[in-house]
Amino acid sequence: MHDLESLFRIVDRFRETRVLLLGDLVLDRFILGTPKRISREAPVIILRHEGQEDIPGGGANSLANLQALGVNVLPIGFVGADEPGEALLKALKARNINTEAISRVPGYRTPMKVRILGGGASSLKHQVARYDVEDSLQLDGDRVRELKGRLKELIKTSQALALSDYGYGAVPLEAFRGLERPRSSWICLDSRRRIGDFHGVDGVTPNLGELEAWAGKELSDDEEISNAAESLRTNLGARFILATRGNQGMTLVQEEGQPLHLPVFGTDEVADVTGAGDTVLATLIAALAAGAQPAEAAQLANIAGGLVVMKLGTATISAGELREGIRRWGRGA
């Protein structure tokens, strides 16, 4: 069991760290309404429009979480020259996130997940429908070289680089390969479909489905999950793999030592898992940047993940909330 004071000290150092994030930046748009009646045109509920909330999603949700934790975060990425791209930049700036290294790409549609929520005026609203706007970002050789040069320069003064790969094209392997960096820095990856391609990262945070897809089989117990994670770690030459397992907690495998199985923090009765993986990546990379060892960083990420799933929608965890979570964990709550 980790010393509570050491975990508190790590969180205190968040504000002294600088983390880069290269990722697919997504806009999460929530359309809110109250039920009015059943449509005469089709058997569907008609909602009276109440409002709209635009929240950073995907890699941008990891940015928002890093900012909420007090980390000095700098995003490197792309949005389209469109209304959702403008809305996403506005949402990031509202959170005091520096957007200077985010490029607007004409012809590229900013990825957007639109959730339509309905409910009474004084009650919780629930999703009644969702649609996604997706595109594939095509980066030419000049843009990739520019991106690699920017990464090479900025990582010199950063403690860590997070890669948030949702598969929309903003994380090209060419920009990452051969990247020169300080020996003390960390690079961690969260990837939907390419966890086996990023050779040279320090850590990867696959969920169980992503790990099973890479292994090519269902993983039914701790031993199978540990073996698959270790195989992935060896394949990538990584220092650790942190597999997230929903209400079964997390499993950490490292270069040395036995696998570490972390039970789920809090309750397994969750409110909303939207964006939980982004919170895990953000807390993990923040802790590593602040000097934590992987086991300490994994414990903090586990606590943060348990806290964020109790919130509705795309949410963040603050440093204060994480400190309170550490206290509860220390009491066995």
Image (cartoon, rainbow, N blue to C red):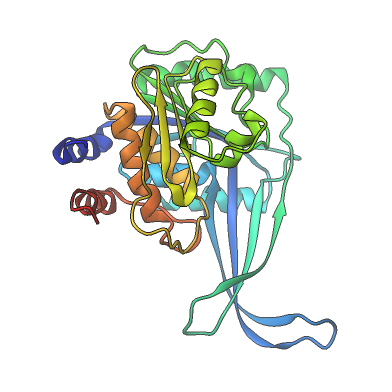
Is 199 rendered above or below residue 325? above
Residue located at (39% from left, 30% from top): 19
Q: Is 211 in front, or is 72? A: 211
Q: Is residue 278 visible?
A: yes
Residue located at (36% from left, 46% from top): 263
Q: Is residue 102 visible?
A: no
Residue located at (66% from left, 81% from top): 47
Is 128 rendered above or below residue 216? below
Whole-percent x, y for residue 160 in the image: 39, 25
Task: Name which quarter of the figure residue 24 lies in.
Answer: top right
Whole-percent x, y for residue 173 in the image: 63, 20
Q: Is 92 in front, or is 188? A: 188
Q: Is 77 in front, or is 197? A: 197
Q: How many marks?
A: 0
Where is the N terminus found, in terms of image quarters? top left
Whole-percent x, y for residue 212 in the image: 61, 35
- Left or right of 212? Residue 179 is left
Where is the C terminus found, in terms of image quarters? bottom left
Whole-percent x, y for residue 311 in the image: 42, 62
Task: Name which quarter of the figure residue 148 lies in.
Answer: top right
